[in-house]
Image: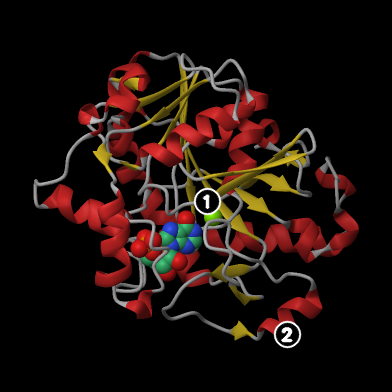
Amino acid sequence: MVRNILVGGQYGDEGKGKIISYLALHDKPQVIARGGVGPNAGHEVNYKGKRYPMRMLSCGFVNEKARILIGAGVVVNPEVFLNEVKMIGGDEKRCGVDYRATWLTKEHIERDKKETASAIGSTNTGCGPAVMDRAKRSAKTVSECPELKPYLTDVAKEVNAAKDVLVEGTQGFMLSVYYGTYPFCTSKDTSASSIAADVGLGPKKIDDVIMVIKSYTTRVGGGPFKNEISREEAEKLGIQEYGTVTGRPRRTSLDLHWDDLRLAAEINSATMIALTKLDVRFPSNTHVKKFNDLSNEAKEFVKKIEKEIGVPVALIGTGKDAEDIIDRRDSL
Ligand code: IMP
Ligand code: MG
């Protein structure tokens, strides 16, 4: 029995989708459940030559045998959900939503544009207002949405009964409404404990917490951000990124913010780090699949991360594809 959680260690967009899809294909969990806020998240996977930008369903769908679930703690936009079910092949039996999850409506999206302070740079996907209505006890749950009827399930029951479970968190630690750069943050806590609760897993049932960090730091939207470089500089370095959900240019810092990462590792109780985009930082390492084949510079970078954060770097992304990865978990 293995129950692992994956969370973001920075400001979201760490490359969680890619790591989740690798774990889905390689570890073959029976159930993959998504926690976190809702369709403000965009997780991307490149698989068999196609790019899938997922906002509601887990990128773990690439394993066709896995059951793909969304936990009670998530706010669900039925339109986005149904589109993504279609995008991954339309199999009703594969996907499920907890009947207790919050129903995100068009009204929430309208309100996000009007009510959320513009300085935060919300994705305006309605998540904040939906979370607010849930707290006010006025939100509807998805159990009232006829289009979602075929997908309604008890996710908590399913994840507790399943043999192998992988839980996908969204956003990143620095966007947590408690531990992040409040008030420039999302509307919920994004740490592993909350993600576990979102899908109905208790704190003693988690084996590994995999914290995903990118080889440099990005942030989309407003708020403090250390050692930011200009967009021109980022373009020149070939690391400028654009948001999956909103298409906005992401802000970039070449540094890893060690104090933040140490706190993130502690509060998430991270047992492993998954480091992404090492190939973007050190291009000669693209598609490398063995640690020993990395350049010295890249190896030193990995070692520095382990030393500074005190958590082993168990997975290393070296390319866009789900399979471009160094998996060191066996040697830890
Ligand atoms: P909201 O949660 O959509 O209201 O956005 C609040 C802040 O969190 C904004 O700065 C967003 O850009 C940021 N944010 C929310 N979700 C994500 C995500 O999945 N990745 C990156 N940034 C996010
Ligand atoms: Mg994203």
| Mark 1–mark 2 distance (CA, rounded to whole Å) | 24 Å
Q: Which residue is mark 2?
A: 232
Residue at x-position 78% and y-position 62%:
280
Q: Is residue 63 above or below residue 38?
A: above
Q: Does any atom of ligand 2 lie closer than 8 Å to the CB of label 1?
A: yes
Residue at the limit of the structure toward the left, as seen here: 137
Residue at x-position 85% and y-position 46%:
287
Secondary structure of residue under mark 2: helix
Q: Position of residue 259 (x, y in %)?
A: 47, 71
Q: Which mark is residue 121?
A: none
Q: Quadrant of residue 214?
A: bottom right
- Is the C terminus in the top left, top right, bottom left or bottom right quadrant? top right
Residue 253 in view in this figure: yes
Secondary structure of residue under mark 1: loop
Colouring: secondary structure
Residue at x-position 52% and y-position 57%:
245
Q: First in sequence, mark 1 or 2: give its number.
A: 1
Q: Is residue 8 above or below residue 1?
A: below
Which kind of residue does numbered mark 2 sit on? Glu
Q: Which residue is mark 1?
A: 42
Q: Position of residue 9 (x, y in %)?
A: 49, 57
Residue at x-position 24% and y-position 70%:
115
Depth check: give the residue in front, 133 or 275.
Answer: 133
Q: Quadrant of residue 241?
A: bottom right
